[in-house]
Structures are given as structure tokens and as C-alpha cells.
Amino acid sequence: MHGEAYAYATYSLFADQAGVQNLPSVQQLFQRTAKVELGEHFAEEAKLNGLAGSDAANLQAAMTGEEYESHTMYPTFAKQARQDGDTAAAGLFEEIAKDESAHHAAFAKALEVVRTGKGAVPAPPGVKPVTVQAGAPRVRAARTKQNLGTALNGEALASAKYTQFAQAATAHGNQALARLFTGTADVERREHFAGEAQLAGIVAPTRQNLTTAINGEQYESRIMYPTYARQAKTAGDAKAAKLFADNANDEASHARAFENARNQLH
């Protein structure tokens, strides 16, 4: 699930870069693949894993994540980045910590509404999209780079989880809560993940982005998912084994599509 969430967020940025380079077919390929990673692979794995529960349980899970990020993870990362001279990263980490604290407060208010039936679910937060430009990392310390990697994975997963929680809220008839989860998911991906991606330098020119995607898809199709499928089969988890095997086939197809796209570039 971490891998699928990260692929979705990353491919969305790679699609934007292809658009900047006026490569509409590659842009559409990244967009289509991103939708599969989130809407099929992540969603199906989340269902088997029982990720989404009641609205109250989903809000509690979200609050736990936001509490950790706002009070522990991001303040620690900010302090370390300042010690290492990565002031831009420190500033971003501090800003995101404040956002996550606000998310926690909104989820806490929503939980009170869900439990008591009184009051109104807060409006979703506004998103300030970050346009990521291709380029090298903008941090220098190995520790900051490692922390950025951790943060990027956390933001991608949070965005994907909140998307599932929003769908659950819709199914439960709580449209206001669905909007809160959807809006927060947008902030996590389009603002936090994107801002961190800019500093980490994960977006490159499209040819290199395609190579990155090919390598990732080949790893998942040849090693990760086949291994998971074998382990699930051995454990007697037949549904998971089938899903992992199916996903391996999908990822192999994605790798071939990305390879074809790269071969057609001049």
C-alpha cells in the first residue's frame, strides 16, 4: 500500500512534467497509470487490509497520524535540518507541522459531530498547490534527504488513506465528512508531498522519469509482488495471493508501456 500510494503521487508529478515538455501522450500515460495505482491497486489492498472502518474509527486513525506528524516527526525533522544547514527544508517541515496540527483539530471536531450528532463538520482546508520543477535536490545533508524520503512516503500514504476514508464517508451518507477527507488528501499530496518532492529533487526530465518508473514497475512485477503472492499462498491467504499476482501482471504491463514511451522519445 505504501508503494502504490507513493507511485500515484509520484506519477502525478511526472505527468505534470511531461505536460511542461509538451509530451501529451506521456502525460496521459502517467495519469492513467497513477489512477490504476490508487483506484485499483491501493483500493483493493486497502479493502483486504480492512483499512477503512466506521467514520469514527477512520477519524481516530487520521488523528493519530496527524498527532504524530505535527508533534513529533516534523518538529524533529525541522530541528535536524536546521542543525545540518538545510534551512529551506527546516522551514517547510515547520510549516507542514502547523498544517498537520490544524488537520488534527478539524478531525477532532468532526469526530465530536459524528459521535454526538450535534454541530457541523468543519469545511475542508484550502490547498495551495506547489508546482514542482525538474531539478537536483535542494538539500545537502544525508539526514535531511533521508527525512524527506520518510516524509514523502508519509504524505503519499496519508493522501491515499484519506481518499479511502472519503469514499467510506460517502457510503455512510456523510458528505460533509467526505469533503473534509478529500480536501485534506489534496493538501497532503498537492501541497505537502509536492513541496517535499521539490526539495528532494525527485522530478527530472521526462526520459529520466520514465526510467525511474520502469525500474520501479519492474521491481514490483518481478520481485515484490511475486514474493508477496508466494508468502500469502503459503499462509493460506488465497485472496491476497491472487491480488498480488494480478498486480504483478499489471505492473509488468505498466513497465512495458513506459518502455515503449521512452523508446518513442527523440
Image (cartoon, helix red, strand yellow):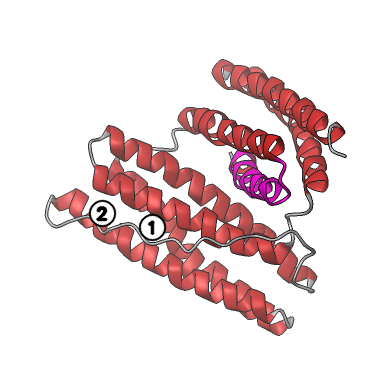
For disc 1, the neighbor class at 10 Å (few under 14, some 14 to 19, many from 20) is many
> Is any part of residue 68 visible from this angle?
yes
48 up-or-down from 127: above or below: above
Q: Which residues are magenta?
A: 4-23
Q: Earlier in the sequence, mark 1 or mark 2?
A: 1
145 up-or-down from 211: above or below: below
Image coordinates for residue 227, horizontal then vertical, percent: 74, 27
Residue drawn at (38%, 57%) of the image? 63
Residue drawn at (62%, 19%) of the image? 241
| CA–CA distance in space, label 1 to label 2 | 9 Å
- CB under 8 Å between discs 1 and 2: yes
Q: Which mark is residue 111?
A: 2
The quarter of the rendered structure image containing the C terminus is top right
For disc 2, the neighbor class at 10 Å (few under 14, some 14 to 19, many from 20) is many
Image coordinates for residue 50, horizontal then vertical, percent: 44, 33
> Is any part of residue 80 visible from this angle?
no
* Amino acid type of the residue that numbered disc 2 sits on in the rendered structure: Leu
Q: Which mark is residue 133?
A: none
In the rendered structure, the answer to whether residue 65 lies left or right of residue 248 reads left
Label 1: state its secondary structure: helix
Q: Which mark is residue 63?
A: 1
* Amino acid type of the residue that numbered disc 1 sits on in the rendered structure: Met
Q: Nearer the viewer, residue 56 or 203?
A: 203
In the rendered structure, the answer to whether residue 66 lies left or right of residue 261 reads left
Label 2: state its secondary structure: helix
